Amino acid sequence: MNSTQAAAALIITAAMISAHPALGQGSNACAVRARSSAVAVVICPPNLGQERWKQAGEAACAEMATCSAWIWDDPSKAPQSAPPLATGLTQQEILSSAAIWDNDTKRLVLIEKVRP
């Protein structure tokens, strides 16, 4: 893929993301911070809820056959870039995430915070 094709793909992807209700405009919008070939880093406002997380994950993985969308409700704890595979996330990044959308199984996995 040359640079013109890559730029066109980026513009098309950005347009699709902004048109999707889960990742659209507004104070309750989620955003894809970064994406690799198999992982999307998604930032959502706190207390958004499972249904919106599911929609955000589906939208983030829409064009990817194999994809996991990792969702954080605290942007300061999410990675700045997406690793090639989820195994590249640190333990702290994993534990601080709110949920994971697994596009292969079409399931939302919640990350439960355990208090000592």
Image (cartoon, helix red, strand yellow):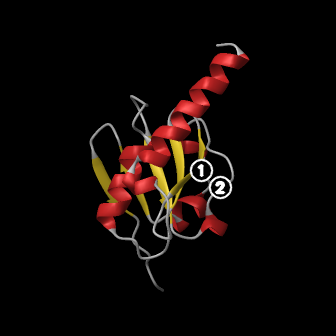
Residue 20: percent from left, percent from top:
40, 48
Relative to 16, residue 55 above or below: below
Relative to 114, residue 93 above or below: above
Image mark for residue 31: none
Q: What residue type is disc 1 on?
A: Leu
> Pointer 2: what residue?
79
Q: Earlier in the sequence, mark 2 or mark 1?
A: 2
Distance Cα–Cα, label 2 vs label 1 = 8 Å
**At numbered mark 2, what does the secondary structure look like: helix, strand or loop?**
loop
Q: Quadrant of residue 9?
A: top right
Residue at image location 72% in from the left, 18% down from the top = 3
> Pointer 1: what residue?
89
State yes or no: discs 2 and 1 in contact (Cβ < 8 Å). yes
Residue 26: percent from left, percent from top:
49, 66
Outermost residue toward the top?
1
Which sits in the foreground, 15 or 58?
15
Q: What residue type is disc 2 on?
A: Pro
